[in-house]
Image: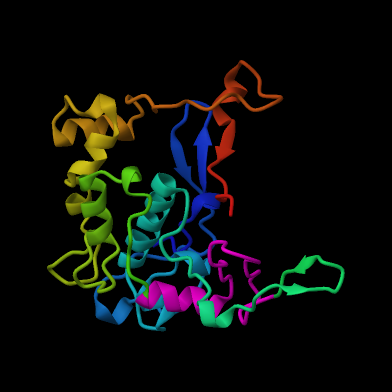
């Protein structure tokens, strides 16, 4: 149970394969209801609904966080970044010299001066509210295939008991096979389309499938054995 899956904790090695890092908040996988995690930790934007609501949680929270990350990689933004309500925004005012001033809305986000998009609210309370209640939308539409939409709808199920990737045997353990069986993974990787389910996952895990876009070497990287440890962060999306 990682508990802090986010872009900053995913690195790309010099060949373009992803590596999950920072196990400082990780704990043993829960086994049964009596062993569920309780501590709220990690990064708010990637918290699962059960963590926001201070409920006990299982590996399903990592499934949620990982699929928020997948959404971001496809759309370039989080599915649960809240927007400031129009009623919470103040309009621009004239400073007396003919210049417009921006005023802050109730959540300390910059409100648009005229006709702009709603301001993005960054307060923790607003983010938590969006995670629990905001309707999941797929925008821009052309960023999502029908298979991606299906994966994200099922993996971002607010009910952890019915979320994709959770064992139906005990509603706690991870069911990795159900995640791996989803068709989106293979459709997203060109080299995998000609392989059976088991064969392509084995090829992926042993790095025999080439990443679609290998990263450029970092400045200062060497063309010897040291290069195998060269890493790049996926990084934080731009706001």
Q: Can you say whether 203 is above or below 125 in the image? A: above
Left or right: 134 with respect to 34? Answer: right
Res. 162 in view:
yes
Left or right: 102 with respect to 163? Answer: right
Instruction: Count every numbered label the image shows and give the total.
Output: 0
Q: Can you say whether 120 is above or below 38 in the image? A: above
Q: 218 or 120, which is in the foreground?
A: 120
Left or right: 218 with respect to 137? Answer: right
Q: Main secondary structure of the magenta part?
A: loop
Residue 15: horizontal and vertical position, in percent? Answer: 48, 26
Q: 133 or 158, which is in the foreground?
A: 133
Quadrant occupied by the N terminus: bottom left
Quadrant occupied by the C terminus: bottom right
Residue 36, picture quadrant: bottom left
Residue 170, picture quadrant: bottom left
Res. 40 in view:
no
Residue with the most extreme right position: 97
Q: Residue at x 54, y 26 (%)?
A: 228
Q: Is residue 111 magenta?
A: yes
Q: Can you say whether 137 is above or below 227 in the image? A: below
The magenta region covers: 104-133
Residue 209: horizontal and vertical position, in percent? Answer: 32, 26
Residue 25: horizontal and vertical position, in percent? Answer: 51, 65
Residue 75: horizontal and vertical position, in percent? Answer: 41, 48
Q: Is residue 108 magenta?
A: yes
Q: Can you say whether 127 is above or below 179 in the image? A: below
């Amino acid at each position: 149970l990682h508990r802090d899956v986010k872009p900053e904790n995913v690195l790309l090695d010099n060949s373009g394969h992803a590596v999950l890092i920072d196990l400082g908040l990780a704990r043993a996988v829960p086994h049964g209801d009596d062993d569920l995690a309780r501590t709220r930790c990690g990064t708010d934007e990637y918290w699962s609904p059960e963590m926001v609501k201070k409920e006990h949680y299982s590996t399903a929270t990592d499934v949620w966080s990982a699929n928020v990350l997948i959404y971001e990689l496809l759309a370039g933004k989080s599915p649960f970044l809240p927007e400031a309500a129009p009623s919470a925004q103040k309009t621009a005012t004239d400073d007396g010299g003919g210049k417009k001033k921006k005023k802050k809305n109730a959540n300390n986000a910059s409100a648009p001066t005229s006709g702009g998009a709603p301001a993005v609210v960054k307060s923790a309370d607003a983010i938590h509210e969006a995670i629990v209640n905001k309707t999941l939308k797929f925008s821009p539409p052309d960023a999502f295939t029908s298979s991606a939409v299906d994966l994200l709808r099922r993996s971002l199920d607010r009910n952890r008991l019915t979320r994709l990737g959770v064992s139906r045997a005990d509603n706690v353990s991870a069911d990795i096979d159900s995640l791996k069986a989803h068709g989106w993974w293979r459709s997203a990787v060109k080299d995998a389309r000609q392989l059976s389910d088991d064969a392509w996952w084995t090829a992926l895990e042993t790095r025999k499938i080439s990443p679609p876009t290998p990263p450029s070497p970092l400045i200062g990287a060497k063309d010897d054995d040291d290069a195998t440890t060269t890493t790049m962060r996926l990084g934080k999306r731009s706001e």
